[in-house]
Image: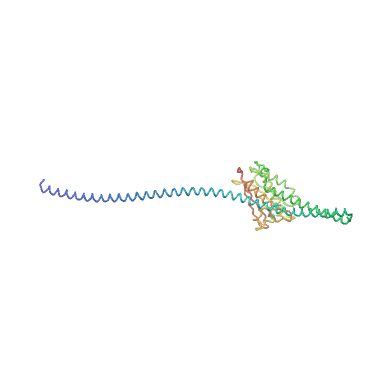
Amino acid sequence: MTSTDAETTIRQLQKQNRILAKQLKRSEADRAKLEDFNRDKESILKRIICELQESQSVLEKKGQDLEQTLHELTLTQSKLVEAEKMAALGALVAGVAHEINTPIGTSITLASTLGDETKDLVKAMAQGSLKRSRFQNYLKVAQNCAALLFINLDRAGQLVQSFKQVAVDQSSLEQRTFLVKPYLMEIITSLSPHFKNTYHQIDLVGDDTITLNSYPGAIAQIVTNLVTNSLTHAYGDGDHGHITLEVCAKEHYILLRYKDDGGGISEQNLSKIFEPFFTTARNRGGTGLGLHIIYNLVTQNLQGQISVSSQPDQGTQFDIKLPVHLKKN
Ligand SMILES: Nc1ncnc2c1ncn2[C@@H]1O[C@H](COP(=O)(O)OP(=O)(O)OP(=O)(O)O)[C@@H](O)[C@H]1O
Ligand SMILES: [Mg+2]
C-alpha cells in the first residue's frame, strides 16, 4: 500500500466515522424521545388504573347502597301489605258495625215500645181501669213487636254469621289431596235442593283424574256462594238457566271456570263486586259479603287468583286459578 492509498483509506474511515457518529446521535435522540413517550404512556396508564380503581370502589359502594335500598323496599312492601290488610279489616269492622246497627237499633226501639205499653197496662190494671178494647190493643202491639224483634234479631244474627265467615278460621279447614271433579260433583249434589222448583240446570265438565292438594272445604264454600249468587241475582222467575262448572289442568295450576248465562253485571258494578258489603239485593236480605268471602278464600287460603268477566245480558264468568301445591306459610 502506497502512502496515498493509506491517506484515502484514512479519509474514508474518518467519513464513515462521522456518519456513524451522526447516526449514533440521531438514535440517541430517538431513544430519548421514546423514553419520554414511554414515560408519558406509563403515567397515563397509572392514571387510568387509578381512575378504574376509584370507579370500582364507587360501584361497589353503589352496589351495597342498592342492596340496602332493595332490603328496605322489601320491608316497606311487606309493611304496606300488612297496613292494607289492617285497613281492609278496619273497613270491614266499620261496615259490620254499621250493618248491625240498623237491626239492633230497631230492636231497641221495639223493646222499649213493648216495655212502655206493658207498664201502662200494669198501671191500668192496678187502677182497675183496664178496658177490654185496651187489652186487645195491647195484645196486638205485643204480637207485632215480638214478630219484628224476631226478624231484626235474626238479621243481626245472620250478619254476625257472615262476618265470622269472612275471617275463615284456618284451623277449621282441613288440607288434603283429593280428586277435584268427583268432589265438585258432591258439592253440586248437596246444592240440589236449591234447584228444586226451578228450571235451571248445572253441568260439570272436565277430566275426572285431576287431583289437588288443598282445602276442599274452602272450595265447597266458594262453589256454594257462586251457585247461590247465580240463583239469586242472575235469573228471574221462570228462566231456564244454564250453569257450567269446568275443571282443567294447566301447566302449573288448575283452572276452575264457573259460568252462568243470566242477566250479567253492569260495568259500573263489576269493579265493586268483591268489596265487602257491596250488594244490589239489600232489600232481599243480601249482605254483600258472599264474593268478598270467595275472594279471601281464593287469594289467601288457596293461594290462587280469581277474575270475573260479565256484561249485562251476557251472563257471568269467574275464572279461579289454583296452585297444585300450596306453599307453606
Ligand atoms: N252470577 C251473578 N249474576 C249477576 N250478578 C251477580 C252475580 N254474582 C254476584 N252478582 C252481583 O254482585 C253483588 C255482590 O255479590 P255478593 O255475593 O258479594 O253479595 P250478595 O249476594 O248480594 O249478598 P250475600 O252473598 O252476602 O248474601 C250482588 O249483589 C249482585 O249484584
Ligand atoms: Mg252472594
Residue 257 image offset from top left, x and y in percent:
65, 50
- Please state which of residues 203 and 33 is positioned toward the viewer in this rendering: 33
Up/down of 274 relative to 173, above or below: below
Task: Say which of 80 and 204 sits in front.
Answer: 80
**Location of residue 244 in the rendering, given as x and y in whole percent from the top left corner:** 68, 50
- Quadrant of the image containing the C terminus: top right
Task: Pinpoint residue 270: horizontal percent, then vertical percent.
Answer: 65, 56
Q: Taking 67 as reference, is 52 left or right?
A: left
Of all residues, the one furthest to the front in this rendering is 127
Count up the numbered dots.
Answer: 0
Question: In which quadrant will I find the N terminus?
Answer: top left
Residue reaching furthest to the left: 2
Q: Answer with left or right where residue 111 lies relative to residue 206.
A: right
Colour approach in the figure: rainbow
Give coordinates of residue 124: x percent, y percent.
Answer: 87, 55
Residue 150 left/right relative to 207 = right
